[in-house]
Image (cartoon, grey):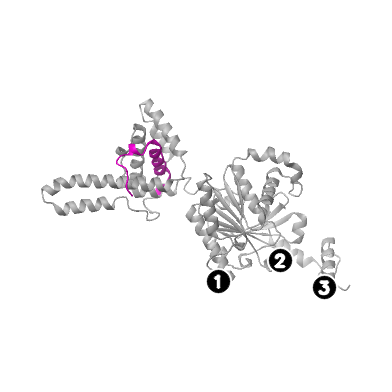
Amino acid sequence: MVALKSMDQYGPQFQTKVISALLNHKSFLINIHDILSDEYFSGSSNKWIVKEIVKYFEKYHTNLSMDVLKVELQKVNNEVLQIAIKEQLKSAYSSSDEDLEYVTEEFSSFCKNQQLGKALLKSVDLLNSGEYDSIRTLVDNALKAGQDKNVGHEYKKDIEDRYRENHRVVVPTPWPEINSLLQGGLGNGDYGMLFGNPGGGKSWLMVALGGFATKLGYNPIHYTLELGESYVGLRYDAYHTKIPVDTIREHKDKVEEVVPNLKGELIITELISGKATVTTIEAHIGKMKDLGFKPDLIIVDYADLMTTTKRTVDRKAEIDYINLKLKGMAKELDLPVWSVSQVNREGSKENVIEGNKAAGSYDKTMITDFSMSLSRKRKDKVNGTGRFHIMKNRYGPDGMTYNAKIDTSIGYFEFLSEYDEEDDEEQLISKPLNTFNNVDNFDKQELRSRFFELNPKE
């Protein structure tokens, strides 16, 4: 790439974007720090910021934080310069990342050219003295400058980085119990999955996650492969207004009162079941970013209905591959991704759904960073109850089960006390198995229905 001769030719906006990248993207700073100089920038405020960035990186091997900048800024005696630095920092932190790749590549090329120019000037004196090997070393080092040096998390150097509060950026869930287990919520690059039986409220869980995030000011993209975009929108209306979805159309005025005040922005996108792939989602996210929408959370309802270009006879292998790709997408985009999956027939009969009851493939849970199941039997659906079970958790303990209060007309899920399996076993032991004395009306109706299904002539 041919770069311009000076940073002045790029203009002030380009310089602001470079500073923004140096403040926010550690991988870029790692690659460029050895050829970065405040001399390249115009304006005293830009020079001061870049000098502080380089100084801090050389000592702590990470990006300069806003807290440190505030302290260092107080040491600037020139009041005019201090105001200029504040304004430039404000512009840098609010700068968009939409052309980040171009800015970082162009600036890297500019710095390499500057290094090569300096090397050639030094070579003149070496040439006169016949030091050809030194010339070769000097030019080789200049050509290698700015190459990719990001080898991963350097354990000794990155102590400061891993102990920062914002080292792992998370999007909280609506449930304090889960946030506690996840150290705040699902983090960037994490893949979470919720399992449940048919009609148990899986899609409503996705609405609760997306709705809560939007309330807090995050920007989710909700991909639906089962329900239409408009109907999913109605479910979100029900969630935010606490008006049941079957009557929400009669309360448009309430929706218009509540929804515009939400802090975040929500995009709902319908994908074609059996045709959409993970690449479809990645392409759509790319388009949204081009349009200026920066997502904070990705919801996929649900992964089992997607397909893949890597077709095999074994559907289980396909589902594993889809979930593996979703996990990879979460890492590559540095975003948290939630999805849901059904449990098998055996699992739908259980009070507590374990990992081996996942429909299609048990390996799904191995791919995820966090897995939770929701068990809701027929009585639970009538009584508005259920049980959440923590199947897997990379960030803390798992294996716990919680009783829950549930209203799937508005996407309400509340964690109650921890579930005690022994209570259910005691009830089964004390309950007569050869009499109808203790069968309630719900069970009688269910038995009656089953009888007529098996005896249609009756």
Which-is-in-front pick, marks 1 and 2?
1
Asked whether the viewer can see residue 396, the reply is no
Query: What numbered label is drawn on residue 398?
Result: none
Pointers 1 and 2 in contact (C-beta within 8 Å): no
Between the C-alphas of marks 1 and 3, the distance is: 38 Å
Is 446 placed above or below 384 here?
below
Which-is-in-front pick, marks 1 and 3?
1
Please report the residue visible at 85 percent of the width from the left and 72 percent of the height from the top: 456
Q: Which residue is mark 1?
A: 312
Q: Residue 184 magenta-drawn?
A: no
Q: Amino acid at mark 2?
A: Lys
Q: Amino acid at mark 1?
A: Thr
Query: What numbered label is drawn on residue 454?
Result: 3
Q: Is residue 158 left or right of residue 357?
A: left
Q: Residues within 10 Å of mark 1 (few under 14, many from 20)?
A: few
- Image location (x, y in percent) of residue 279: 52, 59
Residue lying at the far left of the rendered structure:
129
